[in-house]
């Protein structure tokens, strides 16, 4: 008998005819995976001495089968809403310009120009691997004024979630070289996030859902502000509780701050929140989002265009992790196949020893050798990993020996 487990990337249910339920979940935060009953078997006899080359901070994709000898699982691509800061500060001269290439001999460019390039690279590379959508805050219709018109956010995403959405995403962005004629308004991050959350809430909860927030400053434009000074000069703390509530719904938020200094802002009537350390606030926001970075700086804080592109690439790699947890451990280890191959290189041999230079997959050694209940993990290597991240598709099979 042979039953296939198709993993397109993230979670759902299915079953071989006449067999029990199957669930697949993706843990994007490194937290514990969902549990299921079932027997376990001995560790694999090969691939147990090689250490994993990279364990993405986002955690591994968890494949859950019941029964655990064979099964059929359908998994979905990740759903990712980009929530991007389109405030006037992204192109303000000189504050909105930076040395994007670390070359004093070239002209500076706006932070928006660099963000446009980074987003273009992300959606082009991962167009097939993710369902993508876009929210801009404030809206393109926002005004450069000291009133509510600077805080407008559209009631729906500028680009709804969909697969193969790169062209629509790029068409909805202001041009890379746009200036203050288009890039206007405050920083209504909370409003933008709420639009994204509403869109992701319509996606079935078993599917993986993420927000990628990129901003260059402090959130303001709080809802129900008592006056204009509170609207612009007071930090909107609701942004943190909004992200925390989304995390409780299973929607994780990656936070990218664009060249954020670790300092307290001035106390001036300038349309920006007063006496606030944006660096500290974004640290809190990243923790609330459920996928904070290790170390003292919890959010991504690029200081040039290359670092910004690298941050979005790293986040995409965490969302599309190449480490998979098989739970419960398959009974027939020798009959596990990935993309049509048993353990080893894609050529079909079992001599994969270096995940950095070889293509294929391998069983990973246990994190805690003393834990007999630890589920088995596999890692995609080389082209197997890059192909998965580009397409969002992988075929993992729990097969059974012939009766």
Image (cartoon, helix red, strand yellow):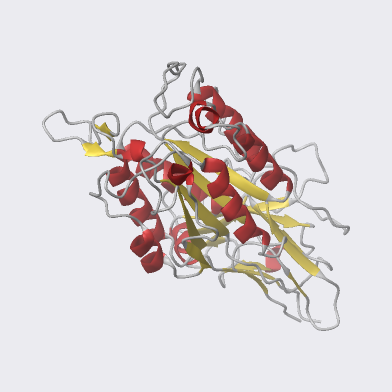
Q: Quadrant of the C terminus?
A: bottom right
Q: Is residue 28 above or below residue 75?
A: above
Q: To which quarter of the image does residue 172 belong?
A: bottom left
Residue 16 vs residue 224: left or right? right
Residue 114, picture quadrant: top left
Residue 246 showing in the rendered view: yes
Q: Judge by depth and name the residue closer to the eye, 324 or 185.
A: 185
**Residue 331's x, y, as percent?**
79, 63
Q: Percent position (x, y) of residue 357? A: 41, 50
* Number of numbered discs on residues: 0
Work out whether 286 lies above or below 266. below
Q: Residue at x 62, y 56 (%)?
A: 209
Question: Which of the two residues, 190 or 121, is positioned nearer the viewer here?
Answer: 190
Residue 277 in the image: x percent, y percent? 50, 20
Q: Residue 283 appears at what percent x and percent y?
A: 56, 28
| Vertical relation: 157 (above or below) 179 | below
Q: Which residue does the image show at 60% across and 37% down from the upper left?
A: 239
Depth order, front residue of 302/148: 148
* Lateral position of residue 26 relative to residue 352, left or right: right
Going by the picture, which residue comes out furthest to the left? 105
Which residue shows up at 40% across the image and 49% down it? 142
In the image, taking residue 70 as reference, residue 74 lies left or right, namely left
Of the 4 image quadrants, the one containing the N terminus is bottom right
Residue 350 visible to an observer of this rendering: no
């Amino acid at each position: 008998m042979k039953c296939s487990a198709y993993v397109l990337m993230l979670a759902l249910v299915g079953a071989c005819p006449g067999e029990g339920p199957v669930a697949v979940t993706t843990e994007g935060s490194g937290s514990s995976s969902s549990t299921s009953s079932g027997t376990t078997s001995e560790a694999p006899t090969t691939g147990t001495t090689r250490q994993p080359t990279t364990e993405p901070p986002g955690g591994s994709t968890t494949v859950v089968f019941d029964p655990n000898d064979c099964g059929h699982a359908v998994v979905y691509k990740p759903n990712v809403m980009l929530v991007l800061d389109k405030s006037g500060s992204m192109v303000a001269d000189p504050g909105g310009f930076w040395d994007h290439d670390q070359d004093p001999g070239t002209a500076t460019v706006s932070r928006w120009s660099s963000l446009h390039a980074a987003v273009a690279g992300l959606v082009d590379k991962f167009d097939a691997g993710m369902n993508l959508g876009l929210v801009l805050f404030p809206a393109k219709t926002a005004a450069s004024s000291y009133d509510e018109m600077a805080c407008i956010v559209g009631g729906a995403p500028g680009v709804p979630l969909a697969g193969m959405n790169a062209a629509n995403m790029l068409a909805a962005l202001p041009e890379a070289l746009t200036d203050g004629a288009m890039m206007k308004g405050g920083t209504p991050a909370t409003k933008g996030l709420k639009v994204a959350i509403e869109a992701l809430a319509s996606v079935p909860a078993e599917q993986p859902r993420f927000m990628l927030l990129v901003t260059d400053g402090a959130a303001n434009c709080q809802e129900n502000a008592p006056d204009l000074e509170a609207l612009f000069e007071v930090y909107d703390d609701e942004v943190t509780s909004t992200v925390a509530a989304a995390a409780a719904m299973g929607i994780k938020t990656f936070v990218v701050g664009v060249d954020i200094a670790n300092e307290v802002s001035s106390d001036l009537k300038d349309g920006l929140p007063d006496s606030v350390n944006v660096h500290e606030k974004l640290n809190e926001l990243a923790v609330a989002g459920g996928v904070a970075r290790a170390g003292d700086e919890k959010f991504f804080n690029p200081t040039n265009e290359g670092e910004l592109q690298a941050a979005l690439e790293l986040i995409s790699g965490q969302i599309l992790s190449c480490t998979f947890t098989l739970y419960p451990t398959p009974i027939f280890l020798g009959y596990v196949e990935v993309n049509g191959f048993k353990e080893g290189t894609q050529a079909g041999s079992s001599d994969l020893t270096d995940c950095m230079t070889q293509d294929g997959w391998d069983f990973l050694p246990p994190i805690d050798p003393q834990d007999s209940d630890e589920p088995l993990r596999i890692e995609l290597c080389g082209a197997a990993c890059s192909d998965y991240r580009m397409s969002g598709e992988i075929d993992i099979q729990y097969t059974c020996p012939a009766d």
